Image (spheres, grey):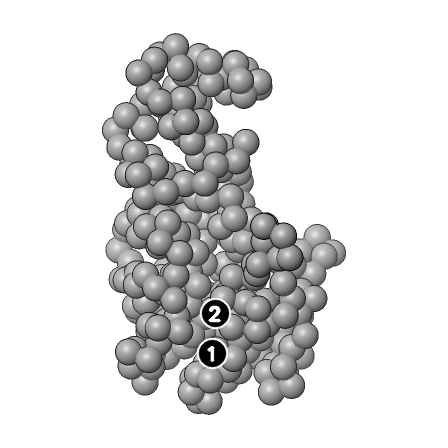
Amino acid sequence: MQHHFDLDHIAFFTSALAAEIRAEYRKQTEKYADTLRIQTALRALWPDLFPSLLSACMTQFALQDRAAATLALPEGSLFTRDALEMASSAAVARLHASLLPENGRVLEIGAGVGADSAALADRAASLLCLESDPVHARLLRHNLSLLPGINATVLRGPAERLLPAIRLDRFDAVYADPARRSLSAGDGRRRSIRLEEYSPPFSLLDSLPDTLPVLVKVAPAAEAPANWSVAAVASAGECKELLLHRNLDLPARCA
């Protein structure tokens, strides 16, 4: 089941009615495995709800169930399919955060819906998140609002536009997870291993101050630039990602 969410969907997902539907959805999934049967039961209880909105709820609930098994975000967090596919697992997010200065001021570029943001904010004195996608930025704000006691701010817009106005000398480290999807020859999108096809392009990250500690998550098949150090992250015998880094207390090549 797939669905493209918009800001109206997100507003509904955070409503009291959506919470009621979610509770009933959980009851139905304990009895039935068939999605159509569950949706029919929900429609019988809320006959005035637009079928497309109920379908969107079903999709969101399924994403939440998937996320609960792997991510460290709290219950009630919201997702898109693309964001969930690219999100760092709880263990990997903690690894990313542990490599950056503790109690520092961290700038996160390409925050998505907050899978890494939660771990970064837990260790950092402050976190500034940049996210270009308006739906993901809205989800990110919601998800971070569920975390007590963190100091995190979200700015929506492309990093290419936002970075020139940010005082980088006020930050102790940068973590970046650029989007790896680029336009394909057809109408869809494909994952790219070419760093300049990322969003933002790697050249923007390469232009950050030379003295600033920087950690960049890239695809495992990406070709690392010669002037960056590389750490491979593996799980269950499979390389999940590469981390390009500089000015961090890590060997030039490590796993």
> In the drawing, what numbered circle is on residue 204?
1
In this figure, what is the number of numbered marks?
2
The location of residue 203, given as percent across then percent down, is: 52, 80
Frontmost residue, 212 versus 156: 156
**Are circles 1 and 2 on residues that touch, CB within 8 Å?**
yes
Please give the name of the residue rendered at 45% of the width and 49% of the height, measured from the top-left corner.
72
Identified by mark 2, the residue type is Pro
Using residue 236 as the reference point, say whether residue 10 is left or right of it: left
Please give the name of the residue rendered at 31% of the width and 16% of the height, measured from the top-left corner.
48
Q: Residue furthest right?
A: 237
Please give the name of the residue rendered at 38% of the width and 67% of the height, measured from the top-left corner.
158
Q: Where does label 2 land, which residue?
A: 200
What is the crowding at mark 1: few (fewer than 14 residues within 10 Å), some, or many (at least 20)? few
> In the drawing, what numbered circle is on residue 115?
none
Please give the name of the residue rendered at 57% of the width and 19% of the height, measured from the top-left corner.
33
Displayed quadrant of residue 154: bottom left
Q: From the image, which quarter does the N terminus lie in?
A: top right
Using residue 40 as the reference point, say whether residue 236 is left or right of it: right
Q: Is residue 93 visible?
A: yes
Q: Is residue 104 visible?
A: no
Q: Secondary structure at mark 2?
A: loop
Identified by mark 1, the residue type is Leu
The location of residue 104, given as percent across then percent down, is: 35, 74
Q: Residue furthest front?
A: 186
Instruction: Give the spatial CA distance, label 1 vs label 2.
Output: 7 Å
